[in-house]
Image (spheres, rainbow, N blue to C red):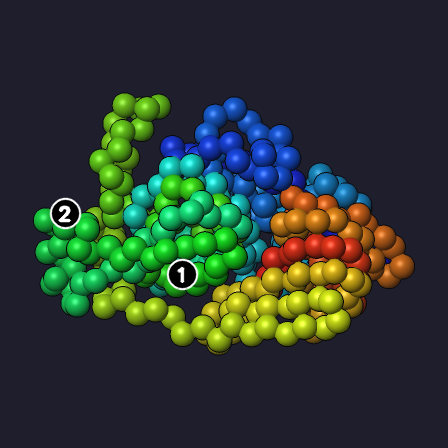
Amino acid sequence: MSEPLFLKPVFHKKLWGGRKLEQAFGYDLPEGNIGECWAISGHPHGRSQVENGQFAGQYLDDLWNDHKELFGDPKGKVFPLLTKILDAEASLSVQVHPDNEYAAKHEHDLGKTECWYVIDAEPGSYLIYGHNAKNKAELDEMIESGDWDDLLRKVPVKTGDFFYVPSGTVHALNKGIMVLETQQSSDTTYRLYDYDRVDQSTGKKRELHIKQSEDTIMVPHQDPELDIQQRSEGKNKFTTYVQPPVSPYFAVYRWQLQEAAVFNHEIGNYTLISILDGSGLLTIEGNDYKLKKGQHLIIPATATQWTIDGELDIIASESGEE
């Protein structure tokens, strides 16, 4: 039997977080400013727990180690992807993530390439995405002098946009933006600039990582060349945002469904699914599972075909690694 793995989200308090995840998805949030919902995660800083079926109560990282068949008998040591929802009630720090080589050497973690699907953006919202330094010397000089207005690129953003953020990209979500983030399973972030904010819980400014940032920032910045593909089947619309080789670590899709759709796995694939809106029914091997807004699940590699019927807006992803 090939059951889907419905996963229980893990929530993280953040200086910049709010309470919109409660309003938007009906989550039962802990107290405080909640900035992140770790929706599908095998990372030790926020382990997803299975809510249903024969693996109920087990953690995703344990399944990865003990039931390789669910994931197509992968070679990797850790579950490679992490799905989050981020609620930026205030602006995040301006930051950069390392690649695999730098992260392995200095952090004993994976590197972090990520991407964002913009669930909601207030009018006038913008991202920090990239920088204007022409070379390493100019970058270091602008950082040292605090010339942030000239250094940082501001990019307007609206609901429904998509951004691919390779390791080495200077970036930040700003106030009034909610995104679904698909990323490598890493929790390594280097803060370049934090608006001189004081963390009220400590009374101190948060730590910056200037040297690590300067070591890992892509210079000059280059926007990735994406080949976003869209197709329609009946009333359903399918979008492919990124996939290998442009994105070596994951493929990300949007499924806008109005009627039943049949999906197939290639051998060894498994699929991560997040329900952003709507409700419907998932059918695998004649067994039905209800789907609703705010759920997150994995279709295991043992399921070669499945059907989703209903009116749903879904972000799905697959690992690009064996």
Quadrant showing the C terminus = bottom right
Q: Is residue 186 visible?
A: yes
In this view, the residue in front, 101 or 88, is 88
In this view, the residue in front, 124 or 278, is 124
Q: Is residue 184 visible?
A: no
In the image, residue 318 lies at what x, y percent?
60, 64
Quadrant showing the N terminus = bottom right
Left or right: where does residue 227 sit relative to residue 74? left
Residue 310 is labelled as none
Left or right: where does residue 225 sit relative to residue 202? right
Whichever of callouts 1 and 2 sits on the residue coming sooner in the sequence is 2
In the image, residue 213 lies at what x, y percent?
25, 53
Q: Which residue is mark 2?
A: 146
Count of marks placed on residues:
2
Look at label 1 and name its amino acid.
Val
Q: Secondary structure at mark 2?
A: loop
Q: Which residue is mark 1?
A: 165
In this view, the residue in front, 188 or 74, is 188
In the image, residue 59 lies at what x, y percent?
64, 44
In the image, residue 94 lies at what x, y percent?
30, 48
Look at label 2 and name its amino acid.
Gly
The image quadrant of residue 254 is bottom right
The residue sitting at 46% across, 37% down in the picture is: 35
Compute the Cα span from label 1 to label 2: 23 Å
Left or right: where does residue 319 sit relative to residue 33? right
The residue sitting at 17% across, 55% down in the picture is: 150
In this view, the residue in front, 186 or 230, is 230
Q: Is residue 212 above or below residue 88?
A: below
